[in-house]
Structure formats: C-alpha cells, structure tokens
Amino acid sequence: MGVAQVQNELSVYQSMAARFDTAAEKLKLDEGLKKYLRTPNREIIVHIPVLMDSGQLEVFDGFRVQHSIARGPAKGGIRYSPDVTLDEIRGLAAEMTWKCAVVNIPFGGAKGGIICDPNQLSLGELERITRRYTAEILDYIGPERDVPAPDMNTNEQTMAWIMDTYSMHVRHTVTASVTGKPLDLGGSRGRREATGRGCMIVCHEALKRFGRRIDTTRVIIQGFGNVGSQAARLMYEAGYKIIGVADVHGGIFNTHGLDIHALIDYVSEHKTVVGFPDGESIGNQEILEQDCDVLIPAATESVITSKNADRIKARILVEGANSPTTPPADDILFDRGVFVVPDILANAGGVTVSYFEWVQDRQGYFWPEVDVNERLKHIQVSAFNDVVRYGEKHNVNNRIAAYMLAIDRVSFSLKLRGIYA
Ligand code: GLU
C-alpha cells in the first residue's frame, strides 16, 4: 500500500543523481565513467493494447529501464501504479545497480513499471496487461539478460504470468526468468519475508552499535504492504515493541505496543489498519513524527523531506521503501545525529533472496528456509559492516558510504571489462 507523499522536492532520478554526484566526487571518479554510470544503458517504452472486460480496447504505457549489466544480468522489480513515470523508473533502476553492488551479488540494475491503477482492474485485465507487457519486452529479458521481480502492486501471481509468457515464447519452462514466484513454480523459501527480514537484520546491527536492547526498542512502521507487514511481524516476534503502523488510509498508534498478529488478522478482514480497536488513530504522515527509537518508512518515495525531517524523533531510520528520504532531508537528519540505514542497504534483503531464487532455479535444487535465512543474514550483516566502516573511514554518512562502496565496485568491474568499441 502506498502512502501519499508530503512533497516531492526532487524526483527519484534527481535524488539518485545528486547522491551519485556526491559519492563520485569523493571517489574522484573519472569524468567519462561518471557520465557513463549516471545514465542507464537502455530505456524501453511500450504502449500495450489490452482488451478490457467491457469489450473495449485500452492502451497502457509501460517502461523497462536497464541501468547496468556491468556485474551481471540486470535485476529489479516491476511496479503498477497510476503515478509511475519514466523518470522514477530510471532513478529506481540505477538504485538497483547500487543495491546489488552494496550486497555484492552478481547482478546489474533494472526497474519496470506500467501506468495503471490495479485497484480498478479485474484479475483478467491484470493478467492480459502483464502478459502483453512481457511479450513487448521479451527480447530484452531472460535469466542471462534481465530478471524481473515484484515491486509496488505486483506479486507472486504477476511473476507467474511473466514466467509463463516468457516460457511459452521460448517453448520451454524457464523458471529463472523472474524471481519472487510462487513456491510451486520455482520460488524460493523465505523470499516473501526477505525484504522485511533484511530490515530487521540491519536494525539488530544498528541497535548493537548503540548498545540497545530489542525489548525496550519502540518501532514505528509506515506502510503495511509486503515490506511493512513482514517487517512488523518478524520484529514483533523478535521482541520489538511496535508502537505505530500506518497504511495509505491512515495509521494506528499505541505507546504500550500493538499486537501485530491481531493487527494482521484485522487487516486481512478490513483491508486497512484503520479502525483497529487496540490503539488510537493517527495520520499516515503524522505517524512519522511520533516519538520512537526506530522509524521504518516502508511505503513509498519522498515521504521524509526538508519539510518534516527536523521533526523526525527516531534515533535510527531503516529505509524499507526505495527512496523514502530526499537529499535535503538527508542533511537535516545527519546534522541531528539520526543513524540512517539507507534503502540500498536496508531493503536489499528482497533482491538478495531473489539472487538465491535465481541460483536455485538454475541448479534445480531448492534450499531449506533456514539456509536461505542464514545466508541472507550473513550477506546483510557483512554489507552493513562494510557500509558503516566505509563511512567512518571516509568521514561520510551511511548513504554516501553505501553509494561510494557500490560505485567503486561497479566501476572496478567496468574497468576490468573495458569499453567495447
Ligand atoms: N523490488 C524489489 C527491490 O526494489 C526487489 C527486486 C528484485 O528482487 O529483483 O529491491
């Protein structure tokens, strides 16, 4: 579920580019490489004709941006939303390159999107949109080229349709063509929880740095879609006190802690957290500014801006969503001593388990969930330590440290490969 933005002071691409420029400058990156890495390799725009249930023909616009294949196949989700823009997809595709490099998995970065409102579409219409979009980008995707995954408003079913459409065209079943699939179609155990679990893992690491205990740590989560709800559940089960949760309709707040299992049952019936009996209602922007120890924005981009950053009371910010904080807000949070675990590190659990899924599909051998979770933990803890140490060494905040580390890794691969003329 998305949450309305406070104010979009910089577009997603502009935010990415501003951070890229800062990091590239600190790395003293060669001007040519800088130009190359700031721009995506390929941008595909498709106009998809779809027969609606009414019998009318409708045309939807879709995008797939492949930012980089320097370290491996392009990798990244596909989102469905009425507000998707090419600029947003371009920014998010680049962030996927940096995210995969931060956790050191052998992928480049991509992102896709279709301008549509999934709430207004039937299941049949969604399937036809998905299949035709897949057919339009078919020449550019595949296990060795570009591997889609779920993102906002897409899920396991969407991935099953993409995998099937791709497989029908190439005349055999290619489970490794997408990740985030249902378990019965080559999905990985632990993939559904992976992004939320990753947020919890980096949160544990951040607490250790401050010598804090889990059971006295108060957490607020904005967003109750796949990332927010799984983070809430896992952190609740680990002993954190979840004092506030919000979705696109509003929020619920209880300083004594919410019963997240009861809340999940409530949401499956009412489709929103609003009205949950055991707490006070609160706005989904207001909730960001409440007193807490850990804040997890897990809804949408640009919710923490220069307009509200000085009112954020959390000590630790764990970015479950992509690009929830704008660069001007970064500076304010840094000056106020907020410990930020940036999106390309905090929410990298999803793509990390996507990598495991791709590996398992290619091997045709599937791992038990404990192995998936253990390997995920190992990767995220190492990446957390790499980023924090890098930041300390170069005297930059965690976000710029994560960008520097990623850009350094990608440009090293590029230098080794050379430029094909
Ligand atoms: N959409 C998720 C992300 O933004 C997952 C991408 C993937 O698994 O490829 O990280």
Image (tube, helix red, strand yellow):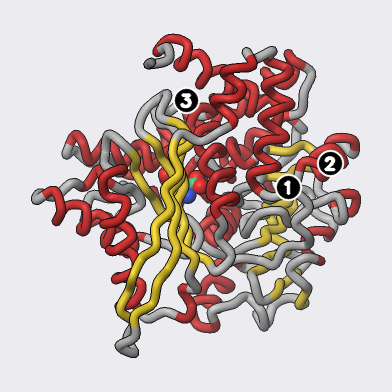
State left or right for residue 168 relative to residue 34: left
Q: Residue at x 37, y 48 (%)?
A: 148
Please give the residue where the numbered disc 3 appears in the rendered image. 104
Dot in front, 1 or 3: 1
Instruction: Using the image, determine if residue 287 lies above or below residue 214.
Output: below
Residue occupied by mark 1: 325
Image location (x, y in percent) of residue 32: 59, 17
Nearest the viewer among 36 and 94 is 36
Q: Position of residue 339 (x, y in %)?
A: 77, 36
Position above or below: 101 against 115: above
Q: CA distance from mark 3 to mark 2?
A: 27 Å
User: Is the CB of the residue bearing disc 1 within 8 angstroms of ligand 1?
Assistant: no
User: In the rendered image, is residue 320 in sight?
Assistant: yes
View extreme (front): residue: 421
Give the total number of marks visible in the rendering: 3
* Quadrant housing residue 68: top left
Is residue 417 positioned above or below 372 on the image?
above
Q: Callout 3: few (<14), some (14-19), or many (20+) C-alpha neighbours within 10 Å? A: some
Q: Kindly identify the amino acid type of the residue bearing the numbered disc 3.
A: Asn
Residue 194 in view in this figure: no
Q: Please tell me whether mark 1 sits on a helix, a strand or a loop.
A: loop
Dot 1 surroundings within 10 Å: few (below 14), some, or many (20 or more)? Answer: many
Image coordinates for residue 78, horizontal then vertical, percent: 43, 54
Q: Nearer the viewer, residue 253 or 364?
A: 364
Q: Nearer the viewer, mark 1 or mark 2?
A: 1
Q: Is residue 14 left or right of residue 184?
A: right
Which residue does the numbered mark 2 point to in the structure image?
A: 333
Instruction: Please report contact status of discs 1 and 2: CB closer than 8 Å, yes or no.
Output: yes
Q: Amino acid at mark 2?
A: Leu
